[in-house]
Amino acid sequence: MTTLTPCLWFDTEAQDAANFYLTVFPNSRITDITYYGEAGPRPAEMVLTVEFELDGHPFTALNGGPEFSFSEAVSFQIDCADQAEVDRYWEALTADGGQESMCGWLKDKYGLSWQVVPRRLVELLADPDPGRAQRVMAAMMPMRKLVIADLEAAADVS
């Protein structure tokens, strides 16, 4: 099977970002670092790429320059088992300059977008009772960090 590896474009922060993500996700590691050489286009010996894994998933961080930045059009979804996991990822990724957004979305301090999603939300949205599912959707929309207890309470309102 072909491996798909997201490549994240940074100006100069590729190694710092990879090191940060390793502190957030378990079972993560840097697998390789390459450097610019005399041919440029950036200074020789500057980090070019950082190959790393987040909980076994491959990523590449590239110091490509200031030409491009992240947007909300692309995000990474974190499947969380429970509220404690939601809270842990939310706090880690919004720390040191990250920004909360709506409906469980956030930007980390590098501007990369993440969706921190509890499995329970998916279950509630798939409820066979369309009224319950719609109440959950309505409760989720104004939330920043998703709170499972509040979503469940909204589902159970009659």
Image (tube, rainbow, N blue to C red):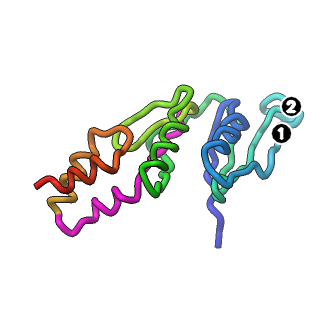
Q: What span is colored magenta in the figure?
A: 111-129
Indicate the amino acid at tag 1: Tyr
Residue 44: give x, y in percent of width and height.
86, 31
Indicate the amino acid at tag 2: Ala
Return the residue found at the far top. 97
Quadrant of residue 100 in the image? Answer: top left
From mark 1 to mark 2, how far is it between C-alphas? 7 Å
Mark 2, residue position: 44
| Residue 6 in the image: above or below residue 4 | above
Relative horizontal placement of residue 112, taking residue 121 as reference (left or right): right
Dot 2: within a 10 Å radius of its alpha carbon, few (fewer than 14), some, or many (20 or more) residues?
few
Mark 1, residue position: 35
For the residues labelled 1 and 2, say whether their Cβ atoms are less than 8 Å apart.
yes
Q: Earlier in the sequence, mark 1 or mark 2?
A: 1
Magenta run includes residue 114: yes
Residue drawn at 17 percent across, 63 percent down? 130
Return the residue found at the far right. 38
